Amino acid sequence: MDLVVSVPDEALASALGELDDARVVLWDLRGPAPEATIDLVVLPYTMGTVDLARLEGVATRLVQTQTLGYDNLVGRVPAPVDGPVQISPPPAVAAVSAEGVQLSAAVRAIVD
């Protein structure tokens, strides 16, 4: 069974390319979810008009920010799944930030 990964824009989908055992769908959370189950939801870099309530009713296991933190998600992610970082009332959704990604890019820029 393939994982379903949503990304907010075509540029990110193109950067990911073809993934083994995963299917990429576009979803910027400004409209209804394209599928009832999305294993990994990547949020837009700028949250602006993103409505996290759109996650309601979507079965997901992980919400990925493209920023260094996830404080703006605490208590606002309603989808029910257990994860290592509780950001919603039980049952929780796991959340990860892009902290390592940002740091890795900065280190590469200094080293290169």
Image (tube, helix red, strand yellow):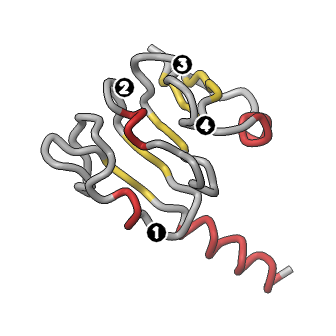
Q: In the rendered structure, are the residues bearing label 2 and label 1 in contact, judged by CB atoms less than 8 Å apart? A: no
**Is disc 1 placed on a helix, strand or loop?**
loop
Work out whether 27 lies above or below 77. above
Residue in the foreground of this view, choosing between 84 and 64: 64
Q: Marks 2 and 4, Cα distance to the nearest angstrom?
A: 14 Å
Nearer-N-terminus badge (2/1): 2
Mark 4 lies on residue: 28
Q: Point out the residue furthest to the bottom here.
A: 110
Badge number at residue 69: 1
Q: Marks 3 and 1, Cα distance to the nearest angstrom?
A: 26 Å
**Is disc 3 placed on a helix, strand or loop?**
loop
Q: Marks 2 and 1, Cα distance to the nearest angstrom?
A: 23 Å
Image quarter of the C terminus: bottom right
Q: Amino acid at mark 2?
A: Val
Q: Local crowd at mark 4 within 10 Å, few (<14), some, or many (≥20)? A: many
* In this picture, residue 87 sits left or right of residue 111: left
Q: In the rendered structure, are the residues bearing label 2 and label 3 in contact, judged by CB atoms less than 8 Å apart? A: no
Nearer-N-terminus badge (2/3): 3
Nearer-N-terminus badge (2/4): 4
Task: Indicate the position of residue 61 as horizontal and vertical percent values.
Answer: 34, 36
State the residue at coordinates (60%, 31%): 27
Q: Marks 4 and 1, Cα distance to the nearest angstrom?
A: 19 Å
Nearest-to-viewer mark from 4 and 1: 4
Nearer-N-terminus badge (3/1): 3
Residue in the foreground of this view, choosing between 14 and 50: 50
Badge number at residue 34: 3
